[in-house]
Image (cartoon, grey):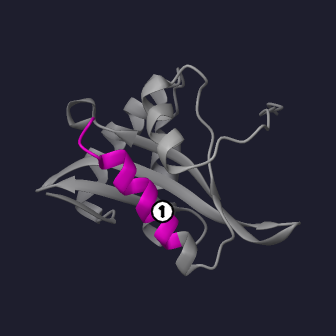
Amino acid sequence: MIAISRLEPADRLAWQQLFEGYNTFYERTLPAETYDEKWQAFQAGTAIHALCARDGDHVVGIAHFFRHPSTSGPDVCYLQDLFTAPEARGCGIGRALVEAVADWARHQRCARVYWHTAEDNEAARRLYDQVAEKTRFVHYRMVL
């Protein structure tokens, strides 16, 4: 049985292993201090938030998200990171995490939840196509 909850202090190692897996998937390497900084921020739960999926005592998925203002209406929620342990894929964990973030956003009175994924991330896009609308927007970024 999958349960969605906040990350607890004892989840630190499992969370970091999943977040490292997420970053490896997107071909990124983060310095150790970034993991420390983000863990502390998730524990504080003020600016950025995290949920995890548990299968019994094991953390098998994570979602990172935050609320921010919108110039065109009520605040919105950005689902920045979503990752499921490879051995737990296909069990509804990603869907459960997306739904839990959406529930959080509704409770915060956000107008919508949005996210990005790689164009070639077919497994994730199969889920996203079922739970959300694909928009026509193209993503740009400027690294500083």
What x and y, as percent, mark residue 103?
A: 47, 71
* Picture quadrant where residue 56 is located: bottom left
In front of the other: 12 or 105: 105
Q: Is residue 45 visible?
A: no
Quarter of the figure that contains the C terminus: top right
Quadrant housing residue 43: bottom left
Number of marks: 1
Mark 1, residues whose alpha carbon is within 10 Å: few (<14), some, or many (≥20)? many
Say which residue label 1 marks: 101
Vertical position of residue 29 compared to residue 131: above or below? above
Residue located farthest toward the right when viewing the structure as drawn: 71
User: Is residue 118 in view?
Assistant: yes
Taken as a whole, is the magenta stretch helix, strand or loop? helix
| Rendered residue at 72%/42% (across/down) | 135
Q: Which residues are magenta?
A: 90-104
* SS at badge 1: helix
Q: Is residue 63 above or below residue 33?
A: below
**Image quadrant in which you'd find residue 52:** bottom left
Q: Residue 139: where, in percent of width, then height? A: 77, 34
Q: In the rendered image of this protein, does residue 111 appear above or below residue 87? A: below
- Where in the figure is residue 76, as x and y percent of width and height? 69, 65
Q: Is residue 16 magenta?
A: no
Q: Does residue 22 appear to the left or right of 14 in the view shown?
A: right
Q: Residue at x 13, y 57 (%)?
A: 1
The residue under the point 21% across, 55% down is: 54
Is 13 positioned to the left or the right of 95 in the image?
A: left
As shown in the figure, which amino acid type bears the numbered disc 1?
Val
